[in-house]
Image (spheres, rainbow, N blue to C red):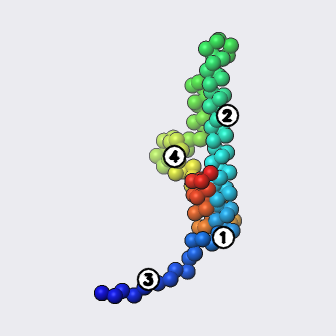
């Protein structure tokens, strides 16, 4: 049977809107920044462990863990403290980056692309 041609879409995947370009740039920036922060924090951890093995410094790791939990953990409805999830961090970041920004949908698509290509 002869089928009619599919309807033409009004969305052009090759047009880059302002929101998309901003999202791509923000995604690349966040990914590169996260790598830099992870590299730095990893280096600090290795240095502290090394200096601790030489008995030059003593690190109170339980206190460090407690400070981390106080800074990043959130309470749920039952009052139990829970660590952040990747989804909650990503949701917070998207909400922060798109506050007072009209092109939210195209920004989010561009942000995901920026994280991918960054």
Q: Which residue is mark 3?
A: 6
Q: Position of residue 6 (x, y in %)?
A: 44, 83
Image quadrant in which the N terminus is located: bottom left
Query: Of marks 4 and 2, which one's residue comes earlier in the chain?
Result: 2
Q: Residues within 10 Å of mark 1 (few under 14, many from 20)?
A: few
Question: Which SS class for mark 4?
Answer: loop
Corner quadrant of residue 99: bottom right
Q: Position of residue 81 (x, y in %)?
A: 51, 41
Query: Of marks 2 and 3, which one's residue comes earlier in the chain?
Result: 3
Query: Of marks 1 and 2, which one's residue comes earlier in the chain?
Result: 1
Q: Residues within 10 Å of mark 3 (few under 14, many from 20)?
A: few
- The numbered mark at residue 85 is 4
Of tags 4 and 2, which is closer to the observer?
Answer: 2
Question: Which SS class for mark 3?
Answer: loop
Q: Position of residue 104 (x, y in %)?
A: 62, 66
Q: CA distance from mark 1 to mark 2?
A: 35 Å
Q: Residue 103, can we see it? A: no
Q: CA distance from mark 2 to mark 3?
A: 53 Å
Q: CA distance from mark 1 to mark 3?
A: 25 Å
Looking at the image, residue 104 lies above or below residue 78 = below
Rendered residue at 59%/41% (across/down):
72
- The numbered mark at residue 17 is 1
């Amino acid at each position: 049977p002869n089928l009619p041609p599919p309807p033409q879409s009004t969305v052009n995947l090759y047009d880059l809107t302002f929101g998309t370009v901003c999202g791509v740039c923000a995604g690349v920036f966040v990914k590169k920044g996260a790598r830099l922060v992870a590299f730095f924090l990893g280096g600090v951890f290795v240095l502290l462990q090394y200096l601790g093995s030489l008995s030059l410094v003593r690190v109170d790791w339980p206190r460090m863990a407690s400070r981390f939990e106080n800074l990043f953990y959130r309470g749920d409805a039952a009052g139990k403290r829970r660590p952040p999830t990747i989804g909650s961090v990503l949701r917070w970041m998207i909400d922060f980056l798109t506050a007072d920004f009209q092109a939210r949908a195209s920004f989010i698509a561009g942000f995901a692309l920026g994280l991918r290509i960054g």
